[in-house]
Image (spheres, rainbow, N blue to C red):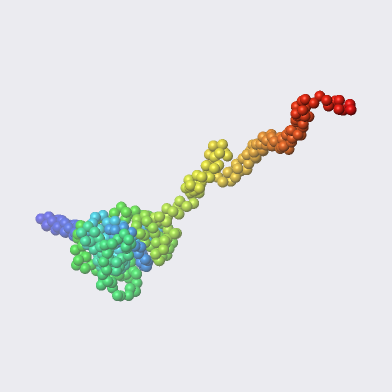
Amino acid sequence: MYQLETAMKNIQKILFFLLVMSIAAAKTSAQVSVGISVRIGPPELPVYVQPPCPVDGYLWQPGYWAYDDGDGYYWVPGVWLAPPDPGVYWTPPYWGYDGGVYLFHTGYWGPHVGFYGGIDYGYGYTGYGFVGGQWSGNRFRYNTAVMRVNRTVVRNTYIDRTVIRNTTVNNRRSFNGPGGVTARPRPQDEVAMRERHIQPTRQQISHQQAASRDRNQHVAVNHGRPVAAAMNKVDGRPFDPRGRVATRSSLGRAGASRSTATPVGRPANTQRPANNSPARQTRERTERPQQGGQQTRSPQPQRMQQREQRQPREQAPQRAQQRQQPQPQQEARPQQQRQEPRPQQQQRPQPQQQQRPQPQQQPHNNPGRPAEPHERHR
């Protein structure tokens, strides 16, 4: 009997322990999963310039330090991205010190911003809540007092400067706990922690994975000063802490343009648009009669050689034509010389006209004079 009572008490203790663990696990999963524990805390948050919002409706995800078992901490750039549903806000991840280790609390989407360790990420995330904007129906309105937007694209804006804190931040610590930020959840934060949450989207996961593959984002290389501090969108343009394009980064467009700049054999492909230009087409048209209708796509040195080889061939028929051309010219010159003896034509029959009828007119004018010979005898 005593053994039975002891067994029942043990069973009750076990059930009570499992109930407590399930409640704690439910709270943890309601906020977000905690899966990484590190014995060394993350570096301080870098100071960087936020790029303007490129698309109306995008929300800002502040940059944070993530961890890789092989390479340690690396910086995930802040980025503008599309929310999974209208009306939801992003709660950033944070590191919290507990039990001698640093635990990573991943971020999540929800109807309200929950607790993110009291970390001052900036640009609306001051440590508690979010003051960078609010939803108005299915459209998001941006508070340009703390957020940067492209006004040619984004026009749902307002200005509320009362949310700006006029306090001096002495540190940029990126974790909650001893030696970091000492903050506790507020009642509204606890309510938000128990609401329905949406896990990070595929774009957010791919964005973090891309940052882990860039060595310039790792602390072991950048010593807490990442090359790409922010991006205008996922797979977009990376920017350094000063807001300039991060040319040394392999993220987004910078990595794509750099990877396609120097492959072997690619310069010939880059010249193809120039070959299809109007100037090129006109030059090919002028060269086709000389080439006998042959089209060549050889490089310029080969074309120069072909032109040099064609010159003697083209000169040979030209010389032959020059030899044949004088023959009709020589035939034409004698004709012009034959037509020159015009003086002979001018001496037509002038002397003949003077001698015409003088001897013949005398006998016809005096036909009846027969005594002329007698007179001569006298």
Q: Quadrant of the C terminus?
A: top right
Q: Quadrant of the N terminus?
A: bottom left
The spot of residue 197 in percent (x, y) is 22, 57
The spot of residue 213 in percent (x, y) is 40, 55
Residue that appears at 27% across and 58% down: 57
The spot of residue 322 in percent (x, y) is 67, 38
Q: Nearer the viewer, residue 150 or 63?
A: 150
Q: Nearer the viewer, residue 252 or 76?
A: 252
> Furthest residue to the bottom?
167
Q: Nearer the viewer, residue 326 or 24?
A: 326
The spot of residue 246 in percent (x, y) is 42, 60
In the shown orientation, is residue 24 left or right of residue 144?
Answer: left
Residue that appears at 22% across and 57% down: 138
- In the rendered image, the vertical position of residue 264 relative to residue 155, given as above or below: above
- In the rendered image, the vertical position of residue 157 relative to residue 265, given as above or below: below
Residue 339, picture quadrant:
top right
- The answer to whether residue 5 is seen in the rendering is yes
Residue that appears at 16% across and 56% down: 15
- In the rendered image, the vertical position of residue 84 relative to residue 349, given as above or below: below
Residue 91, picture quadrant:
bottom left
In the shown orientation, is residue 256 left or right of residue 98?
Answer: right
